[in-house]
Image (tube, rainbow, N blue to C red):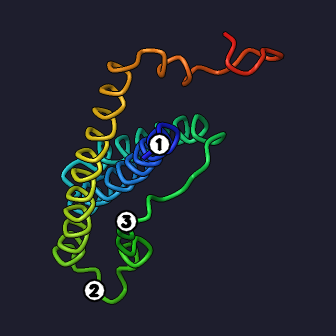
Amino acid sequence: MGLEDLRAHRQELVTEESRVSYWRRILQARMDLIIGHDDHKALQRLGVVLAEHEAHSRRLAVQSLHVPGDAPPLPDLGMLWDTSMLNDDPDAIVARLAEAEHQLSAYRRSLHERLDAATGELIARYHEDPALALSALPMRPGAASGAL
């Protein structure tokens, strides 16, 4: 894989990890609300998750959002919110949410492993040829190609 492709691949992994982490936190907050040990605390947690995602989404807005080709689809998150077929049985709802959270956690771990591998490869290349790191820096407006 060429350097630019490796950088793009790593960025795709970062973006996907952010998306998966967001949905995982949403599922966890939803379980907290259903279990109902402390509704106020659960609502606060959900508010924090949503606020963090909004701030992070603004940072990602200028980036291309592309899911890595071998990424599994997220669980049917819309269906997870439809509790009508479970007759509002909290245990069944929590079990379904917990399974989706488990799938997302496993996928997130695999993303972290792939992200670590891509980062390690970039570091190795930069260590071998430190000038490659400079090519990751943005060019000054009006600068000639290859000039700093």
Quadrant for the C terminus, please: top right
Snapshot quadrant of residue 106: bottom left
What is the CA distance from the residue labelled 1 to the residue labelled 2? Answer: 50 Å
The location of residue 52, given as percent across then percent down, is 46, 37
Is residue 69 toward the left or the right of residue 100 in the image? right
In front: 111, or 99? 111
Which residue does the image show at 57% across and 52% down from the upper left?
65
- Residue under label 3: 70
The reply to whether callout 1 and callout 2 are in contact (CB within 8 Å) is no
Q: Amino acid at mark 2?
A: Leu
Q: Name the kind of residue labelled 3 in the image.
A: Asp
Q: Which residue is mark 2?
A: 86
Give coordinates of residue 91: x percent, y percent.
16, 74
Characterize the local packing of mark 1: few (<14), some (14-19) or many (20 or more) Cα atoms within 10 angstroms: few
Q: Compared to 34, does 75 lie above or below?
A: below
Q: Earlier in the sequence, mark 1 or mark 2?
A: 1
Report the side of 116 relative to 53 (left or right): left
Q: Which element type, helix, strand or loop, lies under badge 1?
A: loop
Under circle 2, the secondary element is helix
Sequence-wise, the earlier of marks 3 and 1 is: 1
Which type of secondary structure does the marked residue at label 3 adopt?
loop
Residue furthest to the top: 148
User: From the viewer's perspective, is the residue at label 2 or at label 3 nearer?
Assistant: 3
Amino acid at circle 1 = Gly
Q: Residue at x 20, y 65 (%)?
A: 98
Is residue 148 or residue 87 the one in the foreground? 148
The disc at residue 2 is 1
Q: Nearer the viewer, mark 1 or mark 2?
A: 1
Q: Earlier in the sequence, mark 2 or mark 3?
A: 3
Are the two marked residues, 2 and 3, in contact with CB atoms closer than 8 angstroms? no
Q: Residue at x 48, y 15 (%)?
A: 131
